[in-house]
Image (cartoon, coloured by chain):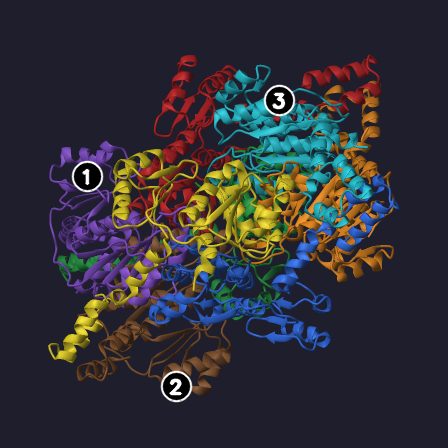
Chain colours: A brown, B purple, C yellow, D blue, E cyan, F orange, G green, H red
Amino acid sequence: MDAEQLAELLKQVKSGDLAVEEAIRKLKSLPFEDLGFARVDGHRGIRCGFPEVIFCEGKRTDDIARIAESIVESGGNLLATRATAEAYDAIKKKLPAAQYHERGRVVVLKQHTQPVPPGTIMIVSAGTSDIPVAEEARVTAETMDNEVQSLYDVGVAGLHRLLSNREELTEASVVVVIAGMEGALASVVGGLVASPVIAVPTSIGYGASFGGIAPLLTMLNSCAPGVAVVNIDNGFGAGYIAALINRTSMRE
Amino acid sequence: MDAEQLAELLKQVKSGDLAVEEAIRKLKSLPFEDLGFARVDGHRGIRCGFPEVIFCEGKRTDDIARIAESIVESGGNLLATRATAEAYDAIKKKLPAAQYHERGRVVVLKQHTQPVPPGTIMIVSAGTSDIPVAEEARVTAETMDNEVQSLYDVGVAGLHRLLSNREELTEASVVVVIAGMEGALASVVGGLVASPVIAVPTSIGYGASFGGIAPLLTMLNSCAPGVAVVNIDNGFGAGYIAALINRTSMRE
Amino acid sequence: MDAEQLAELLKQVKSGDLAVEEAIRKLKSLPFEDLGFARVDGHRGIRCGFPEVIFCEGKRTDDIARIAESIVESGGNLLATRATAEAYDAIKKKLPAAQYHERGRVVVLKQHTQPVPPGTIMIVSAGTSDIPVAEEARVTAETMDNEVQSLYDVGVAGLHRLLSNREELTEASVVVVIAGMEGALASVVGGLVASPVIAVPTSIGYGASFGGIAPLLTMLNSCAPGVAVVNIDNGFGAGYIAALINRTSMRE
Amino acid sequence: MDAEQLAELLKQVKSGDLAVEEAIRKLKSLPFEDLGFARVDGHRGIRCGFPEVIFCEGKRTDDIARIAESIVESGGNLLATRATAEAYDAIKKKLPAAQYHERGRVVVLKQHTQPVPPGTIMIVSAGTSDIPVAEEARVTAETMDNEVQSLYDVGVAGLHRLLSNREELTEASVVVVIAGMEGALASVVGGLVASPVIAVPTSIGYGASFGGIAPLLTMLNSCAPGVAVVNIDNGFGAGYIAALINRTSMRE
Amino acid sequence: MDAEQLAELLKQVKSGDLAVEEAIRKLKSLPFEDLGFARVDGHRGIRCGFPEVIFCEGKRTDDIARIAESIVESGGNLLATRATAEAYDAIKKKLPAAQYHERGRVVVLKQHTQPVPPGTIMIVSAGTSDIPVAEEARVTAETMDNEVQSLYDVGVAGLHRLLSNREELTEASVVVVIAGMEGALASVVGGLVASPVIAVPTSIGYGASFGGIAPLLTMLNSCAPGVAVVNIDNGFGAGYIAALINRTSMRE
Amino acid sequence: MDAEQLAELLKQVKSGDLAVEEAIRKLKSLPFEDLGFARVDGHRGIRCGFPEVIFCEGKRTDDIARIAESIVESGGNLLATRATAEAYDAIKKKLPAAQYHERGRVVVLKQHTQPVPPGTIMIVSAGTSDIPVAEEARVTAETMDNEVQSLYDVGVAGLHRLLSNREELTEASVVVVIAGMEGALASVVGGLVASPVIAVPTSIGYGASFGGIAPLLTMLNSCAPGVAVVNIDNGFGAGYIAALINRTSMRE
Amino acid sequence: MDAEQLAELLKQVKSGDLAVEEAIRKLKSLPFEDLGFARVDGHRGIRCGFPEVIFCEGKRTDDIARIAESIVESGGNLLATRATAEAYDAIKKKLPAAQYHERGRVVVLKQHTQPVPPGTIMIVSAGTSDIPVAEEARVTAETMDNEVQSLYDVGVAGLHRLLSNREELTEASVVVVIAGMEGALASVVGGLVASPVIAVPTSIGYGASFGGIAPLLTMLNSCAPGVAVVNIDNGFGAGYIAALINRTSMRE
Amino acid sequence: MDAEQLAELLKQVKSGDLAVEEAIRKLKSLPFEDLGFARVDGHRGIRCGFPEVIFCEGKRTDDIARIAESIVESGGNLLATRATAEAYDAIKKKLPAAQYHERGRVVVLKQHTQPVPPGTIMIVSAGTSDIPVAEEARVTAETMDNEVQSLYDVGVAGLHRLLSNREELTEASVVVVIAGMEGALASVVGGLVASPVIAVPTSIGYGASFGGIAPLLTMLNSCAPGVAVVNIDNGFGAGYIAALINRTSMRE
């Protein structure tokens, strides 16, 4: 029931075509999302241009293509993460305009944009093997209409690589730090910048890295304040919240 | 070596009082923080009014008081977390203007403020026992010159308590969600709002809560995007990063 | 807004005292729990006689007494779990009719009852040290107006103690099994009865029992179907869901 | 030894054909299940129509087919879980009447039914990837002659999807909640309904979901009472105990 | 129902005083432990002299004394483990003959003995802090009428201490190895002897010993075969099974 | 240096052909295994007939065959565990007399036997999927010249299957209990018999079984004394120590 | 900016071509690694001959070859660990002088050497399956110009194998101990030698070895002092730090 | 049996006072430590001046004093770690020359020294709360006659504090890094220096630090090579192995 239907009901009450008791009964059982809740939800999508997202892992190729098509048909921006080349091929058959970001394993099809906020999101990664996760973050944030810079392979074992870029680091609105192995990069960056840091542990490493638990714990226990953490390998989540943070200044 | 000393050195080079070779040697071995690094650091404190913080747990009362005094003497704002009543008494003897926020166990003494950003930070907590952590977050963010609202005891077992306040929730710039037991509140809030959510697991609970691991995992695995997590019971950390996020719009 | 207020609003629409547009606005922003949600909630309490519950652990004695008083004043049944003798004394001063079940550490004050369902809840515990948890379950279920029987100290190391009572076991509507150490009792009981089994691991044990993780895993992996598990030491939770199950036949 | 054989023995004692000492010896060494224990067991199967179950995972295809045949030949209902298409083909060759529920990976062949209890079992799942587990639960409960409804893809990230179906939820006798990732759905449902909730964590998720540990802990720590938990991905176990609960009202 | 009662029943059947149908009914509902099960159990205690055991930890002093008295009155040997000096005092008041083994925290009162088997149980401990657990094992095995030798403080950091006693080690029937920290002693002993080794991890250690998990894992993974493990700090359990093993040769 | 060489050295000292100082030097640096240590080791193999064992997992097929050949050539009994059919084929080519126990994945070639001890080892397993581990234990114990009986598929969900065989159980010298899922069988058997019980957790199960951790913890925490545990799936280890225990009575 | 550029700048200051203020500004923003930091880093590589290392696992074959080529072109020694035969083939095509150490999975190409320190590094491994890790350590240390000895298959289950080589053990400057299963070898070696011991847990083992956690904990808890630990299976790391230790005496 | 006794035996063989056979028997059963093993052990103590160590935690005060006295009487250096003030008082009564290092909780009494090696051990700690562990390391290394420097409170949140001391860092022979919380300091230092780094995780921290597991994992997974790890809070162990490393150059 949308606003129009509600108006109709009230008019019927007014005209006497609908008894008050019957109107009460109808309103009580009204699914509340019809009263504006879902609309606010829909509204959010339209207002912010935040893409609908398909997490492809564990989904069948034809399902992915079908969901992608339905998102695009309903006018939304498409963002499909963890997409294999096969998944991309299937999507492309239905949506020739879709683009594949291979390293980040992301398929994107943008149909509308929104004003770009003034700040920059900086994506920092420790090693070359963290780059797929970093790219997933980058593409996510860019698809959400943000300016993104990236600084890869600046792990703490060669600290000077990071320090020589500290100017760009300190100028970013948000910094996303992506690191596997021991994940120390998040603490070091957290100590260098005054902006919020979103840390992403990756499952890169071996032995007692335990599939990302080691950097996860490192990042949660960061001695530098201003660091919050998303799930292991969750580049999408980091790019998404970084975009939300960067867009804060666009809210009225 | 600060800027003045550097100027002095360069003047000596200019005047010929210092050989170029000797000047190179001096500049090379220069501790680089003297070249601006530490100054940038200090600059950050002055510019943002971010308080110096004492984590009191495990420190001796007289040490706490002494550090507090030194922070205040150097002109900084004082924020002492996990402070017992005894710690407060010791601080107060030296710094009579210090104030104690008992529920959040925080001691504050503000000496200067900065412009308040337009957005609001909303602190949401699931149960009454999560309130100490929530208050630590609230006082931290307020001390950093933000407008903060709080919404306590709105756990998901009685969902209507949360939903009836959804307007305030959706209007906040940042939402901090604090929950123990199973921590489901973060996902539910993450699904309701368009702003970034900082989640704080608490060690409240028993049995297989394992001192906060249960809500920590819940929050890291949130099915709603836009949620990042800080350490268990780390109200300070949540308030701090929420303040950084809210201040994003104040950056030039 | 309750049903009467809604009727009033609709009457104003009907009479023309309230414009349709204004009515739409009011209904849209209506906290939906006022549309019946919270009322259903309140209704549930009144209809089922399920007690309001205070989890006393970690609460201050005077807070407990104050909450207890407010529950009783609002007409509810009082159930306070994990209550120390001190907590009971504080409650008793305000509510002389409150009773203390010492072994289960539960305070009860019943103000109204509901029809007792025909089935029986059987509480089975493995060792004498599991009895506090068992008693918490028993008092919870009884306060919720169920017939409860108990069979204590029938751990699997002396199987004949359990088997000689199998008739009572098989006749119960629901069986609650409480066990620490290795928790094998749940599987054995699950293999003997045709009714649902609610298993409660307890933190009784030492060494690699890990505060109840060992029996928790045992019970989750029960080779007998028909077993579901609640949290470690959560006698209240087991008694509560057992009562819900036993009352299933009372639902129309 | 069944009742008839026992009668024969006693008649021989009566007639003097069997010495008392010899009868004592026979009765003492009697496998006690022959004295009624196993019969009660068999009786249970016949009385309740609860199917014999084959857990196919890790069993060889021809073994599965052979066990299935033996169950059906002995007159029982067949329920084979975690069955691949190959397993189904092998069963079908021997038992052409067997049916395959592909999404839930269950093979069923019903030979007799029992009266259907009045209540309804509601199966609720958070995401589309939880559906295989949900379907396993649904088919299990239906095969045990219960009326089952299902409500899929109503995770807490879009709360309105769940809330708009709260009427059906609150009317069910038992609710089975199936969720991966963070598993918050169980707490939310537990706070909405007055009936017992059986929660099933699934291994859906990534990173710090740890193959289902995250939702398992979430569910065990649910802040809403009335929730009990079965093993990770154990749709069969949930459907089975839900059926037992729903049938409680059929017990005399 | 014991053998005599069964004979009486059968005689009544024979004489016609009891109808066959009635006899069937009685035999069916017969608690089977009366048919020899419980008797075998009792018989075991008398035949083997295995003591009844009280695990004192977490029990109240007066309860301990009361249970001890009842065991002794019923003619059994008393073994109370984890007994404090207070517990001993309480027992001694009721049972002046009870003796206290202070280091192993065990109270013993023997009332009867059985033939001592020919073999020897050797108790080996790694460090001096493991001695309480070692003594619990020693007293348990001695109370069960075995010859016991002990070899303490022979940890692998000073291997020669162990090797210089290898003759006694290789001559024992069973070796109990007790070690904390890393628990390597079990593997080393397992490689030296041809008899079964029972390993007991202790909670002695710090840091990543995790209350005994480190030596527990070490012992479970022993590269020497012939090693089985009991629970952390479970000296009683080790002494008990060592006694069972040593008595194997006494079984006819 | 063996005894003969030592005699030679001493004779040279006696004859004056070797100076005392030189003899001291030689004896000091003497690898002590040459003084009898290693010989005792070899002696053990010959005396007890305990087989040399090859753990095939992770070894290359040709390596396995080569080691097997060398063991057999040196006169030992061959026991190769975790052997695939391919490994067996490779062994058989070199050693045509080798036999393959397919279910237990064990290759055996016996060249000599020793007297069989009077007692019996009973192998008990909970489910049909535990049988490979059980068979590994059975073949190991038999190869070590013990009489072995087995009782499979007697899990606690159908307790009567176990109880109807309790006579054989109580008569065994040692009982090996093999169980996955929740592993409750070890406690139940431990409560029924007076002989030592060796428990083997298996990795059979799913969800929160965690590859055998659940039954491992269950077995370590057994409420019945007389139970010791070997590593997950370690059927060989259980059969080996059971054989050592059963042979205790053969030691002089 | 390197030293020459700095000299140029200072000369300009001296000549008056550059204002002091402008020089200050330039020096402040100077990336500090250009002031010698990174140069020191490069210096370290040249001075010590420590190889540049490629961790091949998870890298694409052509990437590996390309990085290898670039290292060699820049004059460094090449060490590529976890290299498959395919990776070696790809490297060899570009760098025909590269050599493959198959068992340790290491590719090496040395272009320059440095003086060999007087001490010896001893690599000790417990079982034959630990050899790949041991070989990785050996080749690493040798490539860094150390004298290395190795002693394989000397696990504690056959202690005499180790003890008969104790002279070589005690003479080494550093001992690297590599062990899986329970990892007890590190403690035993630590008790025998006076030199530092670097312990490497391996993921060899099964059941409760948990991919190397068991030996990792064993080694961290070693009762012998003088033992430090590197990550599971990290043979490279052990060889590297052993080389650093052995070269200590070469530092001026 | 020491060298003299051996000479005596050989002389008796030479003189004919002892038969060759009898000499063989005596030499075979000789505890081998008498053949030089223990002597080497003793020799090590005397040669290196490595102190005998008492780990005081969990020991009784009078036991500590008694062991300390015996060590000193036998001429050794005394090092007692984890010593309370009470323990020190008890030691001092017997040994007035003993000194107490309060912050590191260490009691020392040196009776002899050895030549100091040329290198320096640098102890680096992240926070002020890590200082007790750092001091334990420092006193241990100094007591073992090394030159030690320390650099405290240089955690990575304020990187410039560390970097401004990099010259001292790079000049040390060994660096001991002590850090709690997330432990990132070890990786950063490992990337800055060319000497071996020994990392000590501390239990300082809260929430998901888990008593030191977080920094332990961080350090084991260090992306910088040249880092090895000792147990949580094990300052003694770090100081000990650092001393062994620094003394490497003193070995002939």
Task: Report whether F48 appears left or right of D243.
Answer: right
The 10 Å Cα crowd at callout 1, few under 14, some 14 to 19, many 20 or more, is: many
Q: Which mark is residue E213?
A: none
Q: For mark 1, name the chain.
A: B
Q: Tag 2's secondary structure? A: loop
Q: Nearer the viewer, residue F11 or F109?
A: F109
Image location (x, y in percent) of residue D22:
85, 42
Chain for disc number 3: E
Q: Quadrant of the N terminus of chain C?
A: bottom left
Judging from the image, what secondary structure is the residue with disc 3 in?
helix
Q: Is residue G138 visible?
A: no
- x then y, percent, for residue C127: 54, 38
> What's the amino acid at mark 3?
Glu
Left or right side of D85 for A80: left
Type of residue at label 1? Ala
Q: Determine whether label 3 and label 2 are within 8 Å by CB.
A: no
Where is residue D239? Give x, y as percent: 53, 64
Which residue, given by chain and number where applicable, does mark 3 sit on? E73
Q: Nearer the viewer, residue C174 or E64?
A: C174
* Residue type, numbered disc 2: Ala
Q: Which mark is residue B68?
A: 1
- The chain ID associated with circle 2 is A
Mark 2, residue position: A97
Q: Is residue A110 above or below residue H177?
A: below
**SS at mark 1?**
helix
Please tell me whether mark 3 or mark 2 is closer to you in this view.
Answer: 3
Q: In the rendering, at what x and y percent does residue E97 appear?
A: 60, 15
